[in-house]
Image (cartoon, grey):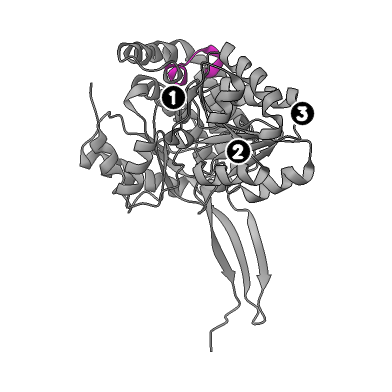
Amino acid sequence: MRTESSTNTIVRMAANAKAASRKLSLLPASAKNAALHAMAKALVQRKPCLMKENRKDLHAARKRNYSKALVDRLTLNSKRIDEMARCLLDTAKLKDPVGEILNAWKRPNGLVIKKVRVPFGVVGIIYESRPNVTSDCIGLCLKSGNAVILKGGKEAFYSNRAIFSVLKSALRRTKVPAEAIQLVASTDRQAVDILLRQDQSIDLIVPRGGEELIRFVAGHSSIPVVKHSKGVCHTYVSDKADIDMARSICFNAKVQRPGVCNAMETMLVHRNIAKRFLPVMIEDLRKAGVEIRGCPRTRRIAGAGIKPAAEKDWTEEYLDLILSVRVVDSLEGAIEHVNTYGSHHSDAIVTKDKNEADQFLKAVDSACLYANASTRFTDGYQFGFGAEVGISTDKLHARGPMGLEELTTYKYQVYGKGQIRK
């Protein structure tokens, strides 16, 4: 397998991306939208090629005995390719953030100051397993005026390379410089090390993947990093909850797609509703193949077959059909549990009491909080952002799903008439 892990290759790639970013930042929205439409059309037209390359990754995954959840994240089918194309088209419909005047004012000396939204420049994205990230991130970066350098994982090597090749070819017929999108076609961890040292050319790094990757990137990068550590997401079922609503929300949050970062990993249940709720909820989950790990009260209420939850289970991101369950004494106890063990990603409360919902949403320190809805909505597309380059659990400069605005910074433009400072 031919790789591009040499220092010279990546340094040159980063420099070319920087030069392209300056041209890209000056393009009007119409030119960027035309490029997004061209890329969407190309994805649909090249479906057979994309699925053929994806089968190579799926074959390797099965030989390596990857989990069902990981194989699901890797899989490209006709529907998912259509969804990738639709994300590009939806991104084209969004307002272009570049050039937006965030504020403007006039000083007593006559100076007019404008705070204007601008692209970062070059965004590096390091990610694992999900090939749709290649398309989604290219679309968001281009629309926000940024060049992008992608470094995918070995799990999706052939899929990423094929998607990138299709999109790169489509760009050649547009006004967007082809060098504005780059792919480090390597499975070597050394390539990541080299990429993280290109602080002269790359302005922001966004890692997407497991905890090990995130920690490695954060610990080795000389470039600012926006990250999420992991997705330990909770749903708290209050004693004031509608039981049928709670069953539907909890089932969706755990089962609909368990191998993603916004899936529920811990379910908290108020003691006053536990005897009515837990037996039926756990039966629903068991029928879907979910393994339950419960606290002592959960095990007493819900019967045999529930494994005891260890302390480490409360901080575990299973990314699988496994769920930890705890009975708590109060809303305050639920909030304390989430703030102690959670990853500040996405957490939900199910309750008919608006004051209780408001208290949970204010007191829990997470990027996305839900009242009476599934945590599975933490997603750039679901939030109306077109897609996302990642979901940040940091507080600077972005938090939650990162869309177009989160891929920009700002600068001050000052207009004078000959003023000098005295």
Q: Which sits in the foreground, 170 or 412?
A: 412
Marks 3 and 2: which is nearer the front? 3
The first of marks 1 and 2 along the sequence is: 1
Left or right side of 58 for 409 = right
Please name the residue shown 40% across and 33% down the image: 210
Marks 3 and 1: which is nearer the front? 3
Query: Does residue 160 belong to the magenta stretch?
Result: no
Kindly report the distance in space between the C-alpha atoms of the residues bearing marks 1 and 2: 26 Å
Q: Which type of secondary structure does the marked residue at label 2 adopt?
A: strand
Task: Tell how many labels.
Answer: 3
Please name the residue shown 64% across and 82% down the image: 109
The first of marks 3 and 2 along the sequence is: 3
- Name the residue tied to disc 1: 131
- Name the residue tied to disc 2: 347
Residue furthest to the bottom in view is: 422
Dominant secondary-structure state across the stretch colored magenta: helix
Residue 168 locus on image (x, y percent): 42, 28
| Disc 3 to disc 2: CB gap under 8 Å | no
Kindly report the distance in space between the C-alpha atoms of the residues bearing marks 3 and 1: 38 Å
Left or right side of 111 for 56 = left
